[in-house]
Amino acid sequence: MQEEILIKNLKDDATQEAAFKDLVSFYKERLYWHIRRIVLDHDDTDDVLQNTFIKVYRNIHSFKEDSTLYTWMYRIATNESLSFIKKKANEYKTTSEEIQTQLVNNLKADTYFDGDEIQLKLQQAIATLPEKQRLVFNMKYFQEMKYEEISAILDTSVGGLKASYHHAVKKIETFLKD
């Protein structure tokens, strides 16, 4: 699917609905897994994904096209996910880090989590990382994104991302050894 054509169709009232259906079917799974690695819970992921697509639909006319559509949507999905975690932390009068730990601890009971003990341990290690390192690690390790893509999504320098990823890997290795 050519992105320029899709964007043109998304911004045209006559073709917007059909183009949006194409957009959702094309990006739904990738965005789902990106969000899922942040919020961890399947039902919460579905809610955040829906909110992401609503924001994309409502704001497509203000999309400046100075990045790719994919990058723009990932930035929205990331922000929606982080906002969701912060909102949940505020509701329970706790920190985002404590919410992450609770979510990881609930993974075993999640019928949609089909990981084994090693994957659960990895998720526990990831939950201990600071927010930025967690995001960078997930995008680089699980989604195999290039540093340039992550840089565009998180609006951070490639050098800073490489350092964040390196520190995240070291912390995860230490966690898994203990």
Image: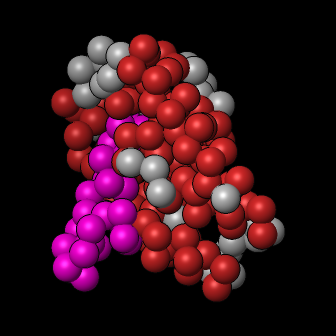
Q: Quadrant of the N terminus?
A: top right
From what the image shows, is residue 39 above or below residue 141? below
Residue 149 position in % (x across, y down): 48, 22
- For the point 64% across and 85% down, which residue is it? 109
For the stretch drawn in magenta, the main secondary structure is helix
Instruction: State the residue in front, 41 or 60.
Output: 41
Considering every residue shown, the one lying at the far bottom of the view is 109
On the question of residue 130 being in view, the answer is yes
**Magenta span covers which residues?**
72-99
Residue 156 position in % (x across, y down): 33, 23
- For the point 26% across and 57% down, which residue is it? 83
Q: Quadrant of the C terminus?
A: bottom right
From what the image shows, is residue 26 above or below residue 6? below
Instruction: State the residue in front, 150 or 95.
Output: 95
Residue 81 position in % (x across, y down): 36, 55
Q: Is residue 161 left or right of residue 84?
A: right
Residue 43 position in % (x across, y down): 50, 75
